Image: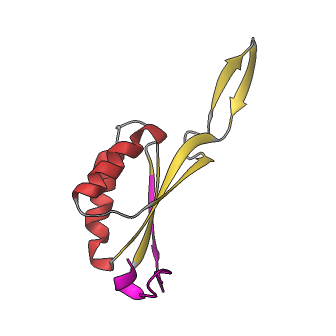
Amino acid sequence: MKLIKAIIKPFKLQEVRQALSSIGVEGMTVTEVKGFGRQKGHTEIYRGSEYTVDFLPKTMVEIAVAADRVGEVINTISKAASSGKIGDGKIFVLPLEHVVRIRTGEVGHEAL
């Protein structure tokens, strides 16, 4: 099992959710986050004063999947989240050792 964490632009969330639903991925956790990558933020002018915005708003989508579905999920997220511009985001894949469904007590793949 793997945990996929995708950092995407907030306005791409619905497209990503719909694309994942179309391949049968139903469960996910979504968190509003802030961060920066190569773009290192930008400057804005507010009430005549210029200031630097270091951390940009992003959305993190976390999905637990069986190891054999990782490639399919990554491709689906990449296609749905891509705008072709800087700041589209990143996808991280981490090992997932143990999963328990609290309601039923199911463990492992059955709990996904």
Image x and y of residue 96, in percent:
46, 80
Image quadrant of residue 45? top right
Image quadrant of residue 69? bottom left
- Tally the marks: 0
Q: Is residue 86 visible?
A: no
**Which image quadrant: the C terminus?**
bottom left
Left or right: where does residue 9 sit relative to residue 37? Answer: left
What residue is shown at x 29% (from left), y 49% (from top)? 18
Image x and y of residue 62, in percent:
46, 62
Colour setting: secondary structure
Q: Which residues are magenta?
A: 90-112
Q: Does the magenta segment cover residue 103? A: yes
Q: Residue furthest front?
A: 103
Image x and y of residue 104, in percent:
43, 84
What residue is shown at x 56% (from left), y 47% (from top)? 37
Q: Is residue 64 visible?
A: yes
What residue is shown at x 59% (from left), y 49% (from top)? 33
Left or right: where does residue 53 sit relative to residue 90? Answer: right
Is 104 situated above or below 89? below
Is 23 situated above or below 19? below
Left or right: where does residue 36 sit relative to residue 9? Answer: right
What residue is shown at x 65% (from left), y 26% (from top)? 43
Q: Residue furthest top?
A: 48
